[in-house]
Image (cartoon, grey):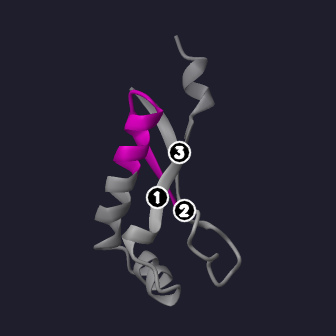
Amino acid sequence: MQNWLVEIGLKDWEPNLKSGARVVTYEEVQATNEVHARHIGFEQFLARLKTDAELQKLMETNHLTPKKCCAAVAIPDLKDHHRS
């Protein structure tokens, strides 16, 4: 398993957030590959959305639902590549 940073952003056809950004949040996960990381990251985002008041407020303020979001990018932790 490797550590990954998953970007939760808006789907391409959705308008920008009120701030002008396209990134909603980031999730840190452990996964075997990029696709796995993106799936786990989105599931973690959905779970956090149920309990994280700050994330809930961001979603409400921008009239977002999870269907308007995606996990299109997952970046591996480069420190993991240097471990033996």
Secondary structure found at label 1: strand
Cα separation between marks 2 and 1: 6 Å
> Which of the marked residues, 2 or 1, is nearer the chain's N terminus?
2
Q: Nearer the viewer, residue 8 or 51?
A: 8
Give the residue at mark 1: 70
Look at label 1 and name its amino acid.
Cys
Mark 2, residue position: 9
As drawn, 64 above or below 29: below
Residue at disc 2, secondary structure? strand
Label 2, residues with CA under 10 Å away: few <14, some 14-19, many ≥20: many
Decide which of tag 3 and tag 1 comes sooner along the chain: 3
Residue 11's tag is none
19 vs 29, left or right, is right
Q: Residue at x 38, y 26 (%)?
A: 1
- Within-10-Å neighbours for mark 3: few <14, some 14–19, many 20+: some
Find residue 65 and report its horizontal and vertical position in percent: 39, 76
Instruction: Name the kind of residue labelled 2 in the image.
Output: Gly
Amino acid of disc 3? Leu
Nearer the observer: mark 3 or 1; the answer is: 1
* Labels 2, 3: front one: 2
Q: Is residue 69 above or below residue 80?
A: below
Q: Residues within 10 Å of mark 1 (few under 14, many from 20)?
A: many
Residue at position x 38%, y 33% from top?
Answer: 31
CB under 8 Å between discs 2 and 1: yes
The mark found on residue 5 in the picture is: 3
At horizontal 45% and vertical 85% (from top left) the residue drawn is 57
Give the extent of the magenta segment: 25-41
Quarter of the view holding residue 15: bottom right
Say above or below: 56 vs 67.
below
